[in-house]
């Protein structure tokens, strides 16, 4: 067994802590996870809801999972969720940590209370402050060239309403200014063409865009997500590049692989059974296994979407809002023209999509629902953005991620039979285990070593820390990874 390289001894004195008074490290006091109290809590809950995916409960016993003494009631607690160093953060969605003082202050503001108790149906009765709230929150973060925002409730709803916008845009162009016909109106009421047209969205093998009816037809991660659900059978998936890591060392073969994938995508665009109206792609395929592609590949997709008149949707639900070292991961591509739509959710705590004016529906109520998002969550997004800016958290993600990645490569080189393909941008990092079973064992052992994280793809482990994750937290993680690798 190798001896520890001593990550925990490192001080990083140059770094001001972004959070004061955190615990010095995780504390696991149970020999199995979930521990006995969590198990009892889950059993009670299971009488009402399916709990088979759950392994920890927060909130009961003052933020502990019930297996250790409650010790930090109400205290700001960013990367450490009392028991664990949390590297998964509510499925990549927690931006500032637990009990963020800034978010608690925002939650107590009169503005927030007003929106909490008088929830508006934003499409028909927006509050007088709504435009200002949007200007000071989401619009300040809008990707270059996109001047409008459609607000929504979740990542899936964002993608699905974005698809609708693309379809309506396409049909409007096709009509070329002519009136909608009575045949259009009558056939759509029978789910038939031409009113309900046969149009398609293209996505990628290994892509994940949600689990509802439209989004699921663009999701290709696991058969179990899709099984038994009717699908849009003419929608098309195309291969996503299977690159070798580290990218710098395999550039020639990776370039070839990307060219192969671009050629197939173009063939599919040309020969699709139903016209492909939109293409959706993640900057890093996340649920699918943290699969990367180069800026050149994404520029290639942009060129193809322009050539064939296809709306390009970049799904930044998981990559957006800072973790890759850019506010939006697609900023790193320097595209010659911006994507048509960028969808978001997770770390913004609110969801929706940015777009240009041409993608507004041509009549009210066509892309619509009761709430159209939630001003409470958008006010949270405003605070999140202010914290990101005042604490330079995107830069923090870039710098902490570079340190963590470098040290993960050291561990990879020490235990090459266990850990391989360390990869990622910013703190959006992952590595592979030899097979799915060993990955699952590694994740379970990391939990017992005090690190909560998740798997993705067939055999990868991913890290999705919050934006206030710093080098001292990285050391706790590195120490755990090294210990688990050495015993594997
Ligand atoms: C890239 C991507 N798109 C869409 C979604 C769906 O988002 P939600 O679960 O909020 O509906 C996810 C969720 O993990 C995601 O990672």
Image: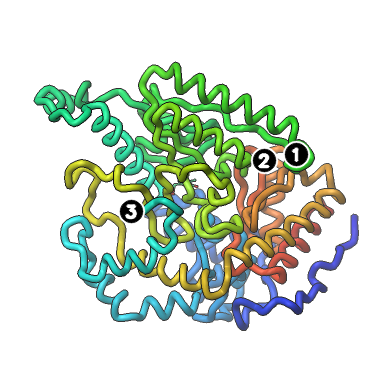
- Rounded to the nearest angstrom, the CA distance separating label 2 from label 3 is 39 Å
Numbered circle sitting on residue 184: none
Of the two numbered discs 1 and 3 in the rendering, the one whose residue sits closer to the viewer? 3
Label 2 or label 3, whichever comes before in sequence order: 3
The image quarter containing residue 84 is: bottom right
The tag on residue 434 is: 1
Q: In the rendered structure, find residue 459 and report the number of the disc placed on it.
A: 2
Quadrant housing residue 361: top left
Q: Is residue 79 visible?
A: yes
Q: Are marks 2 and 3 in contact (CB under 8 Å)?
A: no
Q: Position of residue 346 (x, y in %)?
A: 46, 56
Q: Outermost residue, front direction?
A: 336
Decide: is 479 above or below 353. below
Q: Please name the residue shown 62% across and 44% down the image.
A: 290
Q: Residue furthest bottom?
A: 21
* Figure disc tally: 3
User: Mark 2 or mark 1, which is nearer the start of the sequence?
Assistant: 1
Give percent across and percent down for residue 130.
Answer: 26, 66
Q: In the displayed structure, would residue 66 be above or below residue 421?
A: below
Displayed quadrant of residue 432: top right
Quarter of the picture holding the N terminus? bottom right
Determine whether, in the image, residue 419 is placed left or right of residue 105: right
Q: Where in the figure is residue 35, as x and y percent of width and height?
A: 60, 62
In the image, 136: left or right of 14?
left
Residue 35 visible? The answer is no
- Given residues 465 and 31, the one toward you in this image is 465
Q: In this orientation, which residue lies closer to the viewer: 29 or 446?
A: 446
């Amino acid at each position: 067994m190798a001896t520890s390289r001593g990550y925990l001894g490192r001080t990083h004195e140059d770094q001001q802590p972004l959070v004061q008074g955190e615990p010095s490290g995780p504390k696991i006091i149970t020999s199995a996870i979930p521990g006995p109290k969590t198990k009892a809590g889950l059993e009670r809950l299971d009488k009402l809801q399916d709990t088979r995916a759950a392994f920890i409960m927060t909130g009961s016993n003052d933020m502990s999972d019930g297996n250790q003494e409650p010790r930090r009631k109400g205290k700001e607690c960013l990367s450490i969720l009392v028991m664990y160093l949390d590297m998964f953060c509510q499925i990549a969605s927690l931006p500032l940590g637990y009990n963020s003082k800034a978010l608690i202050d925002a939650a107590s503001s009169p503005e927030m209370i007003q929106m909490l108790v008088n929830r508006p149906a934003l499409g028909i009765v927006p509050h007088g402050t709504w435009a200002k709230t949007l200007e000071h929150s989401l619009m300040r973060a809008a990707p270059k060239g996109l001047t409008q925002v459609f607000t929504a409730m979740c990542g899936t709803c964002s993608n699905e309403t974005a698809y609708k916008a693309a379809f309506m845009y396409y049909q409007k162009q096709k009509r070329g200014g002519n009136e909608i016909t009575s045949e259009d109106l009558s056939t759509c009421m029978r789910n038939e063409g031409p009113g309900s047209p046969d149009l398609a969205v293209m996505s990628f093998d290994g892509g994940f865009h949600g689990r509802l009816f439209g989004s699921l037809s663009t999701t290709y991660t696991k058969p179990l997500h899709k099984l038994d659900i009717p699908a849009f059978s003419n929608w098309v998936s195309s291969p996503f590049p299977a690159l070798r890591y580290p990218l710098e060392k395999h550039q020639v073969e990776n370039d070839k692989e990307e060219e192969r994938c671009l050629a197939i995508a173009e063939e599919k665009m040309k020969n699709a059974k139903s016209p492909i109206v939109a293409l959706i792609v993640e900057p890093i395929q996340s649920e699918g296994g943290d699969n990367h592609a180069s800026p050149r590949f994404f520029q290639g997709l942009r060129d193809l979407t322009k050539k064939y008149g296809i709306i390009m949707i970049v799904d930044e639900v998981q990559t957006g809002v800072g973790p890759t070292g850019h506010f939006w991961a697609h900023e790193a591509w320097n595209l010659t023209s911006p994507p048509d739509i960028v969808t978001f959710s997770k770390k913004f705590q609110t969801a929706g999509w940015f777009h240009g004016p041409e993608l507004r529906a041509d009549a009210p109520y066509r892309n619509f629902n009761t709430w159209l998002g939630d001003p409470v969550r958008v006010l949270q997004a405003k605070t999140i953005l202010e914290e990101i800016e005042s604490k330079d958290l995107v830069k923090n993600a870039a710098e902490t991620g570079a340190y963590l990645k470098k040290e993960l490569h050291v561990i990879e080189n020490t235990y090459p039979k266990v850990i391989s393909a360390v990869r990622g941008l910013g703190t959006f990092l992952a590595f592979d285990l030899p097979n799915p079973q060993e990955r699952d064992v590694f994740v379970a052992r990391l939990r017992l070593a005090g690190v909560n994280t998740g798997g993705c793809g067939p055999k990868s482990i991913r890290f999705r820390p919050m934006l206030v994750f710093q080098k001292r937290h990285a050391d706790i993680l590195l120490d755990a990874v090294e210990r688990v690798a050495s015993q594997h």
